[in-house]
Every structure is written in C-alpha cells, then in structure tokens.
Amino acid sequence: MKTGNRCQLSILNFQLIIIIFTMLLTLGVFSQDTAISGIRHPESGIQDQVSTGAVTGIAEAPQDQGARIGRWVLVIHGGAGGPPQGSMPEEKEQQYREKLSEALSIGTAILERGGSSMEAVEAVVLFMEDCPLFNAGKGAVYNDEGVAELDASIMDGSTLMAGAVTGVTRIKNPIAAAHQVMLKTKHVLLMGEGAELFAKEQGLELVDPSYFQTPARTEQFDRMKKSQREQEMKDDRPKGTVGAVALDNMGNLAAATSTGGLMMKMKGRIGDTPIIGAGTYANNATCAVSCTGTGEYFMRNVIAYDVSALMEYRGWSLEEAANYLIHDKLKSQGGGGGLIAVDKEGNVAMPFNTNAMFRGYAKPKEGSVVEIY
Ligand code: ASP
C-alpha cells in the first residue's frame, strides 16, 4: 500500500510538472523572440511590427525587427520633357542639378534618422514646390486664362491610404493639403474652393493667386498664347512636375506628386497627378510610383497602378514593368513622359521616353545621383 501511495504521488507530481511546463511554454517564457510578432494586413500583404507585450507583459519596441538601418531609398523627379541635351544653357542646367541635390539631401536627412517615407516624400515635394524652377507650387505653369491651377497627391504604401487636391489656386503647398486630406478626412480627393477652405481650417498657408505668377512663367505664357494651343500642348518643352518616392528603414513605401499641370491647359482641366493610380501609387506589397508627362495618357493607362499590378499579378520586376509601360505602351500611343519608382527591396527605376527627365536618387551606400538626360 505504502509503495502504491508513493507511486500515485509521484505520478501526480509528474503530471503537475507537465502542466506547469506547458503553461510556461504557452506564455512564451522559453521562446527567443517573445517581444515581437508580425500581423499581416490582408489588403496590402504588409507585415506590421507589433509587441506581444499583452501576453508576456513586456513591450519591447526597441527590438523592432522591421527596422533595418540603411535600408532606405529615395528617388525624385523634377518633370519629364525638356529640350535635347546641349540646348539648355549650362548655368540653367547647373541650377536644376543644385536644386535636385538639395531636395535629395532634405529627404536623406529624414530617412537617415529613421523618419518615415511619408515624411520624406512630403518634405521633398514641399521643397520643390517652393522652388520657382519646377512646375509645382511657386513655379507652376498657367492655364489658358493665365492662372495657376495646382494638383497634388500623396499615398502611404503601408496602409493604402491616400490624399489629393486638384484645381487649387490659393494653397501655397498643395502637397501638404493632400496629406491633410488623407489624415483628417474620409475622402481621397478635394477640389478647388472646398480644398482651400479645408486647407485653411488645417492651418495651412493660403496665398493670393498672384503668388504663383513668376516672370519666367508669365513670359512662357505670353509666348505660347501667340501660337495655337493644340500645337503647344504637343510640344516637348520642360514640364517640370515634381515627385518623390521612398522606402524607409521600416520597409514602408510612399509616393507624392505635385504639379501645375500643362501650360495653357483649359481652365478646369485635371491631369494624372491628383489621380491615385494614374500619377501616384504606393503599396508595400510592390512599389511606390510617381509619374510625369502628358497626364491624359497616364490617366487612360492608369500607369502608376499598372506598374504595381504587373509586379503583383504577373510577377514582373520593377524594371520590366516600368520600362514596358514607358517605352512600349505609352510610346506606341504617343504619350510622352516618365516615372520614378522604388520597390519593396529598394530597387529603383526611372524610365522616360522624352528628351530629358530631371531626376535623382539617394541610397545609404551609394550617396546621391542627379541626372537630366
Ligand atoms: N502629368 C502632369 C499633368 O498632365 C504634367 C507633367 O507631369 O508635366 O498634369
């Protein structure tokens, strides 16, 4: 009997040990990576980093596995079009190169310190909007009534959220307004007066439309007014829309684009720039894209989204998709322009089928590169 009791007792002890061990295992005490686990957004296929502190009682954000120093990439453009190589005065070309480099260094500083791709693309585009050289913000072209009607959009590849404004004449920095539309409203695209009222409510700076009248654009407008609008719409002079795409250290992609559109466009004309999927698109599952060129072609072919779709559904590389759309599809239709893009691995594409595209990129180990032709 005594031996039987002892035997029963040790079976009980053994069972107790097994139960305690199982409980500890469940709580993750023996696991190497107790702090972080991934959650997948069904729509985007994005891996977010979240703490499982609710189970272990410890939130250990600094061990975030998503962040990788030196993963970031920034790509920018200052518009496609332009005169053939050698026909732009050297001094002018130098000015473009300097401003593109400055724009890259603004974005680089943000991404290097661990800032988000959204923060970087907004800051870069905002800087280019303030620079009269480019066809966006301060340097925007005019419609056929001599007024600058501005478009801008921004998209966050980690959430697939987007914001845009179109046909605004008084918002100093349309890209900032586009970002606020994304953050503060349930809409994607606001137009004209409503967008301006909203921007004012958000504390953004409104200016008199004359702020966008620059001597260079006024001279260009007067010259163009003398000739046929149709002919001028087709020509290859600098368009100068601006855009930026970025991958940050967390692996998040973002895209932003801003423009005055086409010089001498009809009042009320809207191009591809504020249309998500046409001029701007970002998705962590694939890539981030910003387009420039004759917007009507980019809209009809939904170019920015199509880069992503060819990657997602056909398994094409970023380079294959971007080159096909710009050099084959658009070119065969007579659609002039280009795009900049970065994929989730940090690969960069910058194809254009015009004489030139002001462009550049920066990567941690390669520094920054600026190119025009
Ligand atoms: N895509 C712009 C538009 O059509 C113009 C440009 O990129 O130069 O409005």
Image (tube, helix red, strand yellow):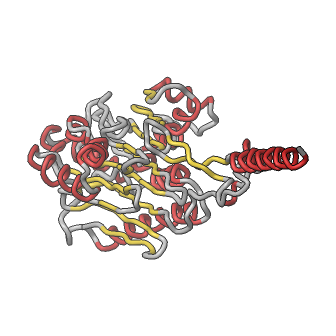
Q: Position of residue 166 (x, y in %)?
A: 40, 32
Q: Position of residue 272 (x, y in %)?
A: 30, 38
Name the residue nearer the viewer: 41 or 216: 41
Residue 363: image quadrant is bottom left
Residue 128: image quadrant is bottom left
* In the image: residue 218, left or right of residue 85: right
Name the residue nearer the viewer: 314 or 298: 314
Residue located at (50% from left, 42% from top): 40
Residue located at (36% from left, 57% from top): 77
Residue 93: image quadrant is bottom left
Instruction: Name the outermost residue toward the right.
Output: 2
Residue located at (62% from left, 29% from top): 201
Q: Quadrant of the N terminus?
A: top right
Q: Is residue 198 above or below residue 239?
A: above
Residue located at (20% from left, 72% from top): 86
Q: Position of residue 84 (x, y in %)?
A: 18, 65
Q: Is residue 309 visible?
A: yes
